[in-house]
Image (cartoon, grey):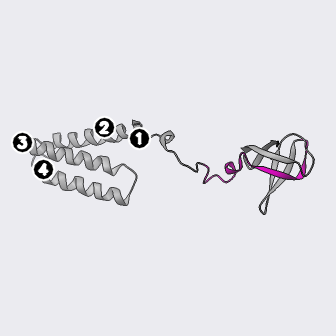
Amino acid sequence: MENLHIEFWHWLIFGLLLLALEVAAPAMVLLWFGFGAIVAGVVLWLVPPLSIGWQIIIFGVVSLASVFGWRKSRFFREENITSDTPDLNNRLRSHIGREYALTEAITNGRGSIRVGDTAWRVRGPDLPSGSQVRVTGVDGVIFTVEKAG
């Protein structure tokens, strides 16, 4: 391995290649290994007699530190992701707060409502058919409701 000779520009090209591959595989991982390769190239440019072993160690340490640093950063956490339509992909939760008329009376805590062309099971206090109810939650595929108004 000591006979292997790598120039600084090899690391830079390798780093740029990894950064370009990140565009095709957007998992935010290749980016950090590309960064590690570029740092290894810059260190080799500054310290030319650096052995290949040290170059690989620098590449590995910088890459892994970058990956773990990103994963622990405040930018990666899901709670920082905001949306004006947080229930866009959750059809049932998008009905919370809306009011509907019971199409089937709630008896023994169970009944149904019609939303568009779909009948939904509901759970709530006993109410007669036609009563207005407000959706307060979702339990699986069953709406939890309360009397509206």
Classify 10 Å Cα crowding around label 2: few (below 14), some (14-19), many (20 and above): some
Q: Residue furthest bottom?
A: 117
Which circle's residue, 4 or 3, is located before the other in the chain? 4
Q: Which residue is mark 1?
A: 75
* In-front residue for pair 1/30: 30
Q: Which residue is mark 2?
A: 65
Mark pair 4, 1: CA separation: 31 Å
Amino acid on which the number 2 mark rests in the picture: Ala
Q: Quadrant of residue 40?
A: top left
Q: Which residue is mark 4?
A: 8
Which circle's residue, 1 or 2, is located before the other in the chain? 2
Residue range corresponding to the magenta coloring: 87-108
Amino acid on which the number 1 mark rests in the picture: Phe
Dot 1 lies on which element? loop
Dot 3 lies on which element? loop
* In-front residue for pair 65/57: 65
* Number of the front mark, 3 or 2: 2
